[in-house]
Image (cartoon, rainbow, N blue to C red):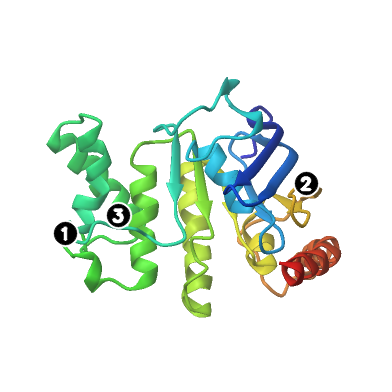
């Protein structure tokens, strides 16, 4: 069910990186509204500031100008109201699947039994029942990302931030993980902001697709995806959405390549 209430708002967000030798404007006057319970996907050319924006929402980076509002409150630092799934799972190798999912809950002061109960529920939800005592080195890439999703959901965050979580997976595993993510999202109805380079992935997952310009990143266009789920990769309407995104992206990809050649 799509929400109508604005869950997150980016207001004139600008981010300038300065290493003392040169300044790079990653984002410039970036404005976006994300509705509650919606699955929003951000796409754009390499280096356009997609991940930088996600890091600012998470509180890992501070904007040079502008602000992020979550439920009307300014975001100033990381917090449990935002769950984050990284490009790489970054699991603790010395802890089991169960230990990785309960870790944050224990830090927050949740009792051991309650944390275990909650973690086991999430482990089952992401399809890893029976692997709760396994260590990360014994898991496949897709399984590790399932653990990362369960860990991010353990806090019961207001919003789930996902930074190209399937980018390192092989094509078949990535397809399965997209389907699994939709299954999990249908159960939780979390507000999601998902960053990807893949137009195929964006059209499959999103309620709303945000297309960014080449650096400095701004919103070039927003496409509402009013297609039922589950979606078929060969459906005419799905393919039409892909073409709309590609059409918006084409000019920006060319600009991005030109920027890279100048560096």
For label 2, the crowd category at 10 Å Cα-Cα, with few meaning under 14, some 14 to 19 and many 20 or more, is: some
Tell me what residue is drawn at x 44 percent, y 32 percent. 81
Q: Earlier in the sequence, mark 1 or mark 3?
A: 1
Residue 143 in the image: state x and y as whole percent. 34, 66
Residue, disc 2: 219
Residue 198 in the image: state x and y as whole percent. 65, 67
Task: Please indicate whether residue 230 sits to the left or right of residue 148 in the image.
Answer: right
Tell me what residue is drawn at x 77 percent, y 57 percent. 214
Would you place residue 127 above or below residue 63 in this image?
below
Measured Cα–Cα span from mark 1 to mark 3:
21 Å
- Work out whether residue 225 can be spotted: no
Q: Residue furthest top?
A: 73
Q: Residue furthest front?
A: 21
Q: Earlier in the sequence, mark 2 or mark 3?
A: 3
Residue, disc 3: 124
Residue 261 lies in what quarter of the image? bottom right
For label 1, the crowd category at 10 Å Cα-Cα, with few meaning under 14, some 14 to 19 and many 20 or more, is: few
Is the C terminus in the top left, top right, bottom left or bottom right quadrant?
Answer: bottom right
| Marks 2, 3: nearer the viewer | 2
| Marks 1, 3: nearer the viewer | 1
Residue at disc 1, secondary structure: loop
Would you place residue 34 above or below residue 67 in this image?
below
Measured Cα–Cα span from mark 2 to mark 3:
37 Å
Task: Please indicate whether residue 103 sits to the left or right of residue 190 in the image.
Answer: left
Measured Cα–Cα span from mark 1 to mark 2:
42 Å
Q: Are marks 1 and 2 in contact (CB under 8 Å)?
A: no
Residue, disc 1: 94
Tell me what residue is drawn at x 32 percent, y 48 percent. 122
Q: Earlier in the sequence, mark 1 or mark 2?
A: 1
């Amino acid at each position: 069910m799509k929400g109508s209430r604005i869950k997150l708002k980016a207001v004139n967000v600008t981010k300038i990186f300065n290493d003392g030798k040169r300044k790079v404007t990653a984002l410039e006057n970036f404005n976006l509204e994300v509705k509650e319970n919606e699955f929003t996907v951000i796409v754009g050319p390499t280096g356009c500031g997609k991940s930088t924006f996600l890091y600012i929402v998470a509180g890992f980076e501070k904007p040079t100008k502008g602000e992020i509002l979550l439920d009307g409150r300014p975001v100033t630092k990381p917090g449990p109201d935002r769950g984050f799934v990284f490009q790489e799972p970054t699991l603790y190798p010395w802890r089991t699947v169960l230990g990785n999912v309960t870790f944050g809950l224990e830090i927050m002061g949740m009792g051991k039994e309650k944390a275990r109960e909650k973690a086991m529920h999430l482990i089952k939800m992401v399809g890893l029942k029976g692997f709760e005592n396994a260590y990360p080195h014994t898991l496949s890439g897709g399984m590790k990302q399932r653990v990362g999703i369960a860990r991010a959901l353990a806090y019961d965050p207001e919003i789930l931030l996902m930074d190209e979580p399937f980018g390192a997976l092989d094509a078949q595993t990535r397809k399965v993980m997209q389907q699994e993510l939709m299954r999990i999202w249908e159960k939780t109805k979390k507000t999601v902001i998902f960053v990807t380079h893949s137009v195929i992935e964006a059209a499959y997952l999103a309620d709303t697709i945000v297309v960014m310009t080449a650096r400095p990143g701004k919103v070039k266009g927003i496409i509402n995806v009013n297609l039922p789920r589950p979606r078929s990769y060969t459906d005419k309407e799905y393919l039409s959405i892909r073409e709309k995104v590609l059409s918006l992206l084409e000019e920006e990809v060319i600009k991005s390549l030109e920027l890279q050649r100048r560096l």
